[in-house]
Image: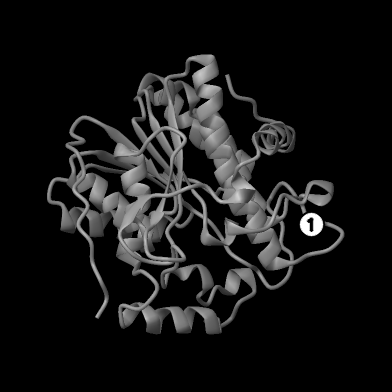
Amino acid sequence: MPRTYDLTLPDLTGQRALVTGASDGMGLGMAASLAGAGAEVVLPVRNRAKGEAAAGTIRARVPGARVVLHDLDLSSLDSVAALGETLVAGGEPIHLMINNAGVMTPPERQTTADGHELQLGTNHLGHFALTARLLPLLRAGRARVTSQSSVAARRGSIHWDDVDWERSYDGMAAYRQSKIACALFGLELSRRSAAAGWGITSNVSHPGVAPTSLLAARPELGRSGDTTSVKVIRWLSGHGLLVGTVETAGLPALMAVTTGDDAGFYGPQWPGNAGGPPGPQAPWSPMRPDDDAARLWEVSGELTGVRFG
C-alpha cells in the first residue's frame, strides 16, 4: 500500500502563494494544501482548461478557497514578462512562491520560443525571469521562495561551453543541468537577498521519485507513450516500496516554503532520498560551488535579458 505522511502547515490566512506547474500532479496537491491552510493561491497555467479544472478541484477540497488563474508559458519570456507586468500592476504582495513547473527528457532536442534548449529554458530560465519580474511583490511580502530541483541533480554539471546543447544533445544530461541550475539559483537568491536587503528567504527542495507526469506520455515532447521508468515507478509507488507518491512528493516543497531554513535543502528522508517523509538534507555536490551559482546568475541574466533589483 502507498505510504502517507502528515505535514501540518502553519496558518497562512492573509498570505498569497504562487505555485507554478499546479494544474495537475504534485503541484496541484501543493496548491490545495496551501489553500487549505488559508492562503490565497495564484495558479499561473499554460493550459487554461486544465487550470480551470485544477481550480475546481481545489475549491471542492477546500470550500471557500481563494484561487486565481493567470496565463503563463514558462518557455516564452514574453509570456513571463506579461504575467509579471499584470501581477506587479495589481500590487498585491506575494508571500510564498514555489517554482515547481518543469519538463523532462524530450527524446529530441527542442527549443523554447526564445531559442533556448527546452529543459533549461522552462525549468530554470523561465523561473529565473519570473522571479526577477515579481521581485517588487516578493520584497513587499518578505516572501519565502522555494525552487524545485530533482534527484537527477545528485550528479552532473552545468554545460558551460554549450548550455543550450546546440552542438550535441543528451536529454538526461540536459535535464540534470536544468535541475542543478534550479538549485544553484535558489541558493544564490538567498545570498543576493541577504546582501541587498531584499528580505526574501530562498531555499531548495526536491520531490524524490514519484509517478508524476514527467516521464509519462507527452506527445508535445515527442513521447507518444509512457516510459518504462514511469511504469516501474508506478508499481513501486503503489506497493509502498522505495519511492513516494504524487501526494508525498510535494511535501518537501511545502515544508521548505512554509517553515524551511534560508538556503536549506529539503527532500524525502529514506536512504537514497527517493521516498519517505520530508526533511532537511545536505546539498549534493553539484549544488555546492558558490562560484558556479554566481556565474549561472550572470549567464541567466544574459540569456533572458532580465536583471534583478
Name the residue: 54% across, 17% down: 195
Relative to residue 123, is residue 40 drawn left or right? left
Question: Please, is residue 98 above or below residue 119 in the view?
Answer: above
Q: Position of residue 177 (x, y in %)?
A: 67, 54
Name the residue: 30% across, 60% down: 277
Q: Quadrant of the C terminus?
A: top right
Picture quadrant of residue 225? bottom right
Q: Residues within 10 Å of mark 1 (few under 14, many from 20)?
A: many
Question: Please, is residue 182 above or below residue 245 in the view?
Answer: above
On the question of residue 122 being in view, the answer is no
Give the colouring mode of the picture: one colour
Q: Quadrant of the N terminus?
A: bottom left
Q: Amino acid at mark 1?
A: Trp
Q: Residue furthest right?
A: 167
Name the residue: 30% across, 78% down: 240
Q: Residue furthest top?
A: 197
On the question of residue 216 being in view, the answer is yes
